[in-house]
Amino acid sequence: MRPIPLRRLLPALIASSALVAAGCGSGGGSSSGAGGSEAPGGAKAGQGRQGGELTDLWASDVDHLDPGQAYYQSSINIERAVNRALYSFSPKDGTNAIPDLADGQPEISQDSKTITVHLRKGVRYAPPVNREVKAQDVKYAIERSFTTNVTGPYAGVYFAEVEGAPAKPVAISALKPFSGLQTPDDYTLVIKLTKPVAQRVAAALVMPITVPVPEDYARKFDAKSPTDYDQYTAFSGPYMVVNDPKTGEVTGHQQQQKIELVRNPNWVKSTDYRPAFLDKIHIQEGNTDQVVAARRTLSGDGLICCDSGQPPTTILRQALTRNKNQLGQTPGGGTRWVAMNTKIKPFDNLNLRKAVIAGFNRNELRRTRGGKIVGPIAQGYIPPGLPGFDESGGLEGFTDLDWMQNPDGDPALAKKYFDAAGKDGVPVSNGRYAGSQKLLMITTNAQPGLKTAQVAASEFERLGFKLDVRKVPQDVLYTKFCGVPKAEVAICPNVGWQKDFYDAQAMLQPTFDGNAILPSNNSNWSQLDDKKINDGIAAATTLGGAERDKAFADINRQIVEQAPAIPFIWDDQFQLEASNVQAVTNPYDGIWDLAFTSLK
Amino acid sequence: MSIGAANLLRGGDGPAEIEPTDAAEARIAARSPLELFLRRLRRDKVAMTALVFIVALVLVAILAPLIVKLVGAPGPQTRDPSTLDDFGIPVSGRGGGAFASGHPFGTDDIGRDVFSRTLYGARVSLEVAFIATTASVVVGVVLGMVAGYFRGWVDTLLSRIMDVQLAFPVLILAIGLGAACSLGNGCFGGLLKPGKAVVILVIALAQWPYMARIIRGQTLSLREKEFIEAARSIGASDRRIIFREILPNLIAPIIVYSTVLIPTNILFEAALSFLGVGVQEPTPSWGAMISEATDVFDVAWWFMLFPGLALLFTVLAFNLVGDGLQDALNPRGKK
Amino acid sequence: MLAYILRRLLWSVFLLLVVSFLVFLIFYLLPSADPAKIRAGRVQDPDVIAAITRQLHLDRPWYEQYLFYLKDLVLHFDFGRSYLTNTSVRSEIFGRLPATISLALGAAVIWLLVGLPIGVVSAVKRGTLWDRLAMGGALVAISAPVYWLGLVSIFIFSSDFGLIPIFDTNGNYTDIWNDPGQWLSSLVLPWLVLATSFAAIYARFMRSNLVEVLDEDYIRTARAKGLRERRVIFRHGVRSAITPIVTIFGLDLGILFGGAILTESVFNIPGIGRAAFSAIQKADMPIIQGTVLIGAMGIILLNLLVDVLYAFLDPRVRY
């Protein structure tokens, strides 16, 4: 289970200039891509043996097959194989999108209010639709996302400025064509915006919201509320989920059990950059016991795993010592921390928070996730690889902030800060907290997060805190507790944030900006509301280049100075493959790319 | 026959509770004075051994802190990071690792002592089982006697309720209730806080009908006996007859079935904890320990083994005593 | 006879109604998360949540919601759709039935084949060392929690790391029509583990029944007539001792058809029990209702079947 909340997979929004610069990557054989992602076996992405069947072991299911609704990492993973958005990311480069359904880079007008995208010719839907993909299909795909029948997760967030888009989702019966989406011919889509934000909208064309949806076929399914299109999805990618060739009913997806992918018979290789080596891909779900799934993968044939991130530590140990070439390791681009609610006593006291961090054994926290091999101890909130990381002191962090210096915990220093807190009126005694109220701590019920929480709880108790620990499922943790300020949770030990895109703002703003505190689905778990930080973020947003990196490094420092949380790891992501599999990770999201994976 | 044996989590993976129809009547017929019953029981060496084990276990649970100290093991919440390797996995090895001095049963996945956690786990198990059993017995006995004594619509209503419950996948219901009440501020508008109380309530709710059925059957046949007739003819009130005349005659079966319910409830609590809807962190519970061990049991077998064995022996001891009690009560069933 | 079956059928339908009503009530009163918020996913816009609330009829009073549910159920055998994924609950559950039934039936065959003979032998050789060992062993088997037994058996027999690596314990379950060999190999150990405590119970039950029956007058008569002991035991004793076991068997099987949560979790079998458990954790009400109802249907139907069967088997039963 990913401890990162609602996985946001929005890369390269800010780096949109890079997007324009990226070369066209069609015909996946080319190995000249920038920063090529190396498969564990040493082979480059794009090379492999044609044919064969692969089984992918998952713990859970996709949230939706309907590209308009797809949101979580696992759904995006499947969409990449069965559908084609206008732009997408090849495993060779996770930061710069390349044209997929589009034929060339988006053309952006001088006033930054119009985007013109040309579509490839010859891309055809799988049965039963069979016909060629047209620009009108993309138009409908975007429009339907604004209905209550679909409620696309990306619609309002990134496409609100499209001319004619409703401010709130409407019923599909009340949906009017958007004046801002025009299709002068079957292969041209013109997007008109009400504000000059074309760069950003163009960057967001990688989202599955731009996967074509044939209105003539889909309309009757969308008429239902919620839409039935999940069960009748039309596919445009190299693969398709097994369906009834007459009605289009998706028969190859059984919830929490399996998804069966086969080749899309109408896919034309010359129109796509994906090599699509495999003939069939079985997604086998319900492998909630990751130890079993991982072990099966290491010793098996034609298997890969695991959808939910890091394999259990016992497997990691085995894989790193014995099956090193069966392990895919990519930087996670995220930070994990134990959040202290700065709105709740006694964590409203800065010295006390510093005392906690100074006394905490962060090394032990990290060890619950597999120790140093999994990643360095986090010294701040901008993870390695993101702009602003080097400006924040790199792996060393801010060396002058003494409470961050000893990851094993420093009792003497903790005592110093406890005493300071005591002077502020916080009950302390003998280098420990001495208050008697029980602090509410909400933990996940799944490993390895549970272990992290257990260690965190025992560290807090060692420092004198009394806790009321409640174990809940991960979804509930966010939707009912840590993400809801009203729930008044004092400690959330299982939170963290992963890059939305390659920019520090996306790391720091949702998590520590006081203006970003929401009544529900809140991700500023510490509820840090520091005017200096809030203003700093607002000011830095408009900056660019080195100035921007420096500004966010400063904000990062101010956050660490406020000691709102105990950051403990910048972890890598691990994926496993059987010895006869040549799997390729897509650095965009750190998991295996099915359309590039092959058998040896 | 032994209904006790039917431990089980109806609705789950355990066999159904077995309804002792014919035997129940036979038992009444063979009812013997308490003295005779005790003498027979004392002769049952196996049951007596098991009884001694249970008494010892209760003592261990009560004196857990003392014993842990005597053995020299750390407390149940103390972590000993030196027993974990770089990956955070408990390691076994000569003169170090999980079995380093002071850890007779090794350490768990975050370095806590399995021995002391297993001892403390007995507390939760016994506490929950005893209280839940008492609750379901009290409710079951009262309602069973009422149904059996008054018959008529009261009986019909209660019997139908029991029928409905029989048709319920009870484990799913229990997990549902447990999950609903363990999440957040509890259920019923925050009246029921997450923790032991929820587990006890869920178990009692699931178990009372069995007791009620048994007691109802016994009451039905008792109320036709001459001494009840006699009491009624001298003008005794219903309440007096129920509590003074009938109840004393039910003591033996109540004890027997309580003994049978306890191990069932121990397993019930462990199963709920195993599924993550039992007692809350960081209270050690055998079921939760086994659940936590599933990720590392191939390399750290001890973490799974000891709580499981503790569970096995405890339940076995109660079952043996229950068997002994039944045999003593109903010697015809023996040989 | 027909009237009896009809009466029982009506009662079963009534029971199902009551069960569905209770489940609805319980999970309506004790929700662990707001379904509309779950459904809304990333779009936590109050208007969107309100719209979803209306779509799912969550703004109606609970009894109206129940009637909506009931209407679909009775008219279309439609259990509704998952709050989280919008998939049909019916197809979700029916897709999982093969796994659950495979597990239950296989285990049932084993426990009958193992449990009953042990019970018979123990009853006949009452008081002997064999009897004591068998009954003692049975008690141990009853006392072991099934999930722990599962883990221990994996530790011992797993083909990957086991001490005696002979069973595939990697959760390779596949439906029998896909690959019968893999189906079998993935289920052998779960069958054995699940059957253990049942076999023990059935052995004990068989033994005590048979012991009682063998004390009956007609058995003495049969013996006095000079019938061979084997014939007495099997033709007369076992035959009547087994009748009450049919009842229990029906109940047990019915319950297992509703999903064996613990065994399914330990062995990674994608059955109904697992679906129910994960749905409960995510407050996915329609799935919970569906699984509980299917479970109840299993219990009630098999009970009905057993009662009818009983009427044929035992002429003393009046209907």
Image (spheres, rainbow, N blue to C red):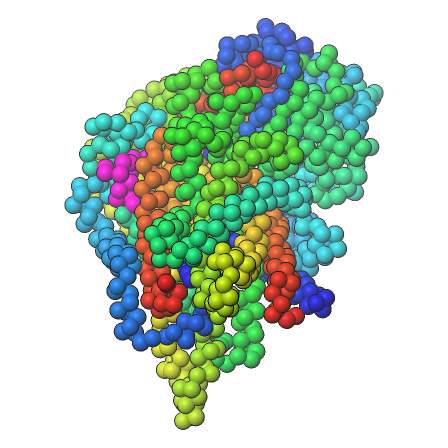
Q: Is residue A253 left or right of residue C173?
A: right
In this rendering, the count of numbered labels is: 0
Q: Is C182 within the magenta?
A: no
Q: Is residue A98 above or below residue A66?
A: above
Q: Quadrant of the N terminus of chain C?
A: bottom right
Residue B334 in the image, given as x and y percentages of width and height? 37, 63
**What residue is shown at x 48% (from left), y 70% (from top)?**
C217
Give the main secondary structure, helix, strand or loop, of the magenta stretch: loop
- In the displayed structure, A282 sits above or below C148; it is above
In the picture as drawn, the residue positioned furthest to the bottom comes out as B234
Tell me if residue A93 can be seen. no
Q: Could you tell me which residue is drawn at 42 percent across and 21 percent down?
A: A319
The magenta stretch is B103-118
- Residue B106, compared with residue B167, is above or below; it is above
Determine the image quadrant of residue B330. Answer: bottom left
* Image spot of residue A576 (x, y percent): 49, 22
Identify the residue at horizontal 64%, vertical 41% (top origin). C95
Of A88 and C138, the residue lying toward us: C138
Would you identify the image quadrant in which residue A115 lies? Answer: top right
Answer whether residue A274 is visible to the viewer in this image. Answer: yes
C310, A491: nearer the viewer = C310
Residue B112 shown in magenta:
yes
User: Residue A314, image x and y in percent?
Assistant: 39, 28
Residue at 57 percent across and 31 percent down: it is C182
Can you give x and y, in whole percent of width and height, for residue A67 in the image?
68, 31
- In the picture, measured across the screen, residue A530 lies left or right of residue B119, that is right
Toward the viewer: A433 or B261?
A: B261
Quarter that holds the C terminus of chain C: bottom right
